[in-house]
Image (cartoon, grey):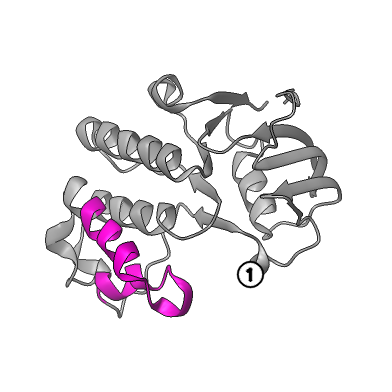
């Protein structure tokens, strides 16, 4: 990846010579992403797409380089302190809790403000999952859980949103609906998103930047 030059505008995410090593695999990344922007990561299996997201979030160690998020150098911060919201492919719902409780756990002290919770309810209505809030995760389809996990991740109050294959379980209609909602939410909130996808149409519709890994 190349480090883009944007004049004097300060990027929300800046990574420079960020080196990551896992076993025999080694990657070095450079990237700038500004408020309101979405970057889509593409590449074959094993090229380090998920590893990059997990390194930014603090779950994979960074060997060297600079990682700046919202003005703070965070490469040495533990995962729980980094200002990011990460959607894993596994979605990570607590199976013994209903969806409402699971969604609230995405907010500090599991207590969203009235405005934050209304945003969640609005998104649930838009993405067609408002009827499932009192159900347990085991009662939902993969696509329903994925839409709910996307809502929880995107609406958490963090400046950088990291999404690993966030539309993989969705049909074409819900994929477009969820993608449009994501794009509008990131732009309106002036945050930034970095997402992994194998689908060319996601990059075409959503990406301000396209990152091709080999």
Q: How many marks?
A: 1
Q: List the single residue furthest toward the right.
A: 64
The answer to whether 18 appears left or right of 171 in the picture is right
Q: Camera-side residue: 62 or 160?
A: 160
Q: Position of residue 49 (x, y in %)?
A: 61, 39
Q: Is residue 55 above or below residue 33?
A: below
Q: Residue furthest left?
A: 131
In the displayed structure, 96 sits above or below 121; it is below
Tell me: residue 213, above or below residue 106.
above
Region in magenta: 98-123
Q: Is residue 148 left or right of residue 203?
A: left
| Front position in the image: 161 or 122 | 122
Please identify the quadrant where the C terminus is shown. top right
Q: Return the residue nearer the eye: 126 or 56.
A: 126
Q: Residues within 10 Å of mark 1 (few under 14, many from 20)?
A: few
- Seen in the picture, residue 115 relative to 104 is either above or below; the reply is above
Residue 41: image x %, image y %? 56, 32
Looking at the image, which residue is at 42% across and 27% down?
A: 206
At a point 61% along the width and 35% down the height, the residue shown is 34
Q: Is there any visible trace of residue 24 in the rendered image? A: no
Quarter holding residue 100: bottom left
Examine the structure image and report whether residue 100 is included in the region drawn in magenta. yes
Lateral position of residue 145 relative to residue 48, left or right: left
| Residue labelled with disc 1 | 80
Locate residue 156, reporting x and y percent: 44, 60
């Amino acid at each position: 990846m190349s480090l883009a030059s944007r004049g004097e505008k300060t990027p929300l995410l800046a990574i420079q010579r960020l080196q990551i090593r896992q076993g025999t695999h080694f990657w070095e990344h450079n990237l700038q992403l500004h408020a309101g922007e979405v970057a889509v990561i593409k590449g074959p299996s094993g090229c380090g797409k998920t590893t990059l997201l997990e390194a930014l979030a603090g779950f994979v160690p960074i060997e060297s380089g600079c990682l700046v998020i919202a003005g703070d150098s965070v490469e040495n911060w533990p995962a729980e302190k980094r200002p990011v919201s990460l959607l894993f492919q596994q979605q990570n719902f607590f199976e013994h809790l209903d969806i409402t409780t699971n969604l609230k756990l995405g907010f500090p002290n599991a207590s969203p403000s009235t405005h934050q919770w209304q945003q969640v309810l609005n998104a649930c209505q838009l993405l067609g999952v408002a009827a499932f809030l009192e159900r347990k995760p085991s009662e939902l389809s993969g696509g329903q859980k994925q839409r709910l996990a996307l809502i929880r991740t995107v609406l958490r109050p963090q400046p950088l949103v990291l999404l690993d294959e966030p539309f993989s379980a969705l049909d074409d209609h819900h994929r477009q609906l969820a993608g449009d909602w994501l794009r509008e939410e990131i732009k309106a909130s002036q945050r930034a998103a970095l997402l992994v996808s194998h689908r060319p149409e996601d990059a075409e519709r959503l990406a301000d930047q396209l990152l091709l890994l080999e």
